[in-house]
Amino acid sequence: MRVNRRVRWAVIPLGIATAISLAACSPTTANGFLPGFDAEGGQATNQTSMIAGLWTTSWIVVLVVGLITWALMGFAAIAYRRRKGQSGLPVQLRYNMPIEMFFTIAPVILVLGFFAFTARDQSILETQYDEPDVCITAIGKQWAWDFQYNGSDCEESEGSVWSMGVQAQTDEQGNVINEIPELVLPVDQTVKIKLESRDVIHSFWIIDFLYKKDMIPEHDNYWSFTPTKEGEFAGKCAELCGQYHSMMLFNVKVVSETEYEDYLATLEAAGQTGDISDVYDRLQNAPGTDGASTAEGEQN
């Protein structure tokens, strides 16, 4: 009986350790429980794994530092506790050169390491495609989005088509009840997005793509990437931009190249052609009103 009990107490921690090890092998765990990955480990863009790697590695390093710090705190609390019969205060000043050097050098190494890896990845993320397959202008406004599809040249509006969106409307439970703006992207095609703002600072964030960039009035930003997985993804403004910031939502739909071309053809057939950025200003669509009351294409 005693042997069986010992075996049981040995098997329980072994089983827990095995379960943790197996869980760590899953794509979800390996990528720090971040969105943008499917069950097979497929990523939303060509940059998603790199961003997740920087995130998870940073957390692992911080966790190790935390464990060492907690262990030293526990050791000090136990080893230098007040013993029976002791009175008064212990020595308040005691200098130890090795420890002082460790507490100085170790944080410097950590900070330099975090900086080096972050700067390396940021340099890659901020490298823009010179000749993208697709160039799109995303325009932020209080509190919605417009998207202009410019072919392969972000600065050329001839032959462009566009879609204009309205801000989200919600019911009493907070569910979106109207059609919000949609950005359509072709899978496995290089994409360059030009980011513009009509009024205040916004931030363009596609959640599963694990990256966001500010949209600053009178200053255009750019973001280049390649969507690698078809599907639908949520997007939103990530910069507090006014009263209805939380309703500044949009959807992203990554489709095949054929479906993408068909979508552009529907915009052209609807007469939504040319340069939208010089024509349409802030679109008012206050909550509680019918989004359809401001007709698409109507200038305020």
Image: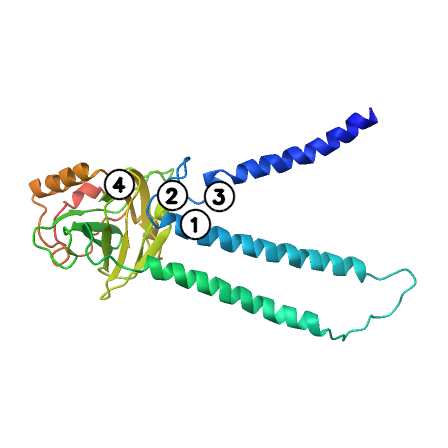
What residue type is disc 2 on? Answer: Gly
- Answer whether labels 1 and 3 touch (C-beta < 8 Å): no
Above or below, comparing residue 105 to residue 294 in the picture:
below
In percent of width and height, residue 118 lies at 43, 61
Q: CA distance from mark 4 to mark 3?
A: 24 Å
Q: Amino acid at mark 1?
A: Ala
**Rendered view: 118 above or below 297:** below
Q: Which residue is mark 3?
A: 30
Contact (Cβ within 8 Å) of mark 4 with mark 3: no
Q: Which residue lies at the image location 81% right of the left edge and 73% below the top edge?
A: 91
User: Mark number for residue 52?
Assistant: 1
Q: What quarter of the picture does the C terminus occupy?
A: bottom left
**Residue sitting nearer the eye, 27 or 298:** 27
Identify the residue shown where x is 14% and y is 40%. Answer: 261
* Mark in front: 3 vs 2: 3
SS type, badge 3? helix
Give me the residue at 59% from left, 66% from top.
106
**SS for callout 1:** helix
Mark 2 and mark 1 residues within 8 Å of each other at the beta carbon? yes
Ranked by sequence position, the earlier of labels 2 and 1 is 2
Which type of secondary structure does the marked residue at label 4 adopt? strand
Q: Which residue is mark 4?
A: 254
Answer with left or right where residue 140 lies relative to residue 68.
Answer: left
Earlier in the chain: of badge 4 and badge 2, it is 2
**Image coordinates for residue 167, horizontal then vertical, percent:** 26, 47
**Inter-mark Cα distance, 1 to 4:** 20 Å
The residue indicated by pointer 2 is: 36
Closest to the camera, between mark 4 and mark 3, is 3
Q: Position of residue 254 (x, y in %)?
A: 26, 40
Quadrant housing residue 275: bottom left
> In this view of the protein, which residue sits in the foreground, 211 or 20?
20
